[in-house]
Image (cartoon, rainbow, N blue to C red):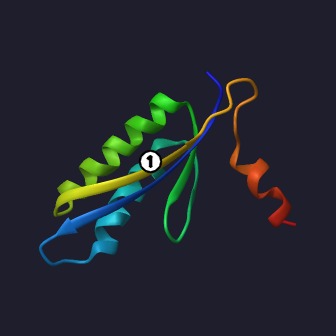
């Protein structure tokens, strides 16, 4: 299968505590996964095989729960091109000179 881009945002709900610290736990899962990724102000974009990226999102949600969230809403966007795949670099290279 060709490489895809998957962007996701976790919105954890917790009783008190710092939401940013909970989101950081989700980002740690992405960092430990070994896939190419970029953290943005509102979402994280990953590049790789769709099944692997979906599994990372599931683990990121679980990490939020373990960090104190009692509920997590997750928003995802997937860019899929079956023939040559999709890369983060193709989208951002003109902005990185």
Which residue occupies 37% across, 65% down? 24
Which residue occupies 68% across, 31% down? 81
Query: Residue beneath label 1, please?
Result: 32
- SS under mark 1: helix
Quarter of the picture holding the C terminus? bottom right
Seen in the picture, residue 3 relative to 35 is either above or below; the reply is: above
Provide residue 3's location: percent of width, then percent of height. Answer: 64, 32
Lateral position of residue 74 relative to residue 86, left or right:
left
Provide residue 58's location: percent of width, then percent of height. Answer: 32, 42
Quarter of the picture holding the N terminus? top right
Seen in the picture, residue 8 relative to 1 is either above or below; the reply is: below
Provide residue 11's location: percent of width, then percent of height. Answer: 32, 63
Question: Can you tell which quarter of the image residue 94 is in?
Answer: bottom right
Which residue occupies 69% across, 49% down? 88
Q: Residues within 10 Å of mark 1 (few under 14, many from 20)?
A: few
Lateral position of residue 21 relative to residue 40, left or right:
left
Lateral position of residue 67 relative to residue 4, left or right:
left
Which residue occupies 49% across, 68% down? 42
């Amino acid at each position: 299968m060709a490489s895809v881009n998957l962007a996701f945002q976790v919105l954890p709900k917790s009783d008190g505590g710092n939401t940013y610290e909970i989101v950081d736990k989700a980002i740690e899962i992405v960092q430990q996964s070994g896939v190419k990724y970029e953290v943005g102000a509102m979402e994280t974009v990953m590049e790789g095989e769709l099944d692997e990226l979906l599994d990372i999102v599931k683990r990121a949600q679980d990490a939020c729960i373990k960090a104190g969230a009692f509920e997590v809403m997750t928003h995802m966007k997937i860019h899929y091109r079956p023939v040559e795949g999709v890369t983060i670099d193709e989208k951002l290279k003109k902005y990185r000179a």
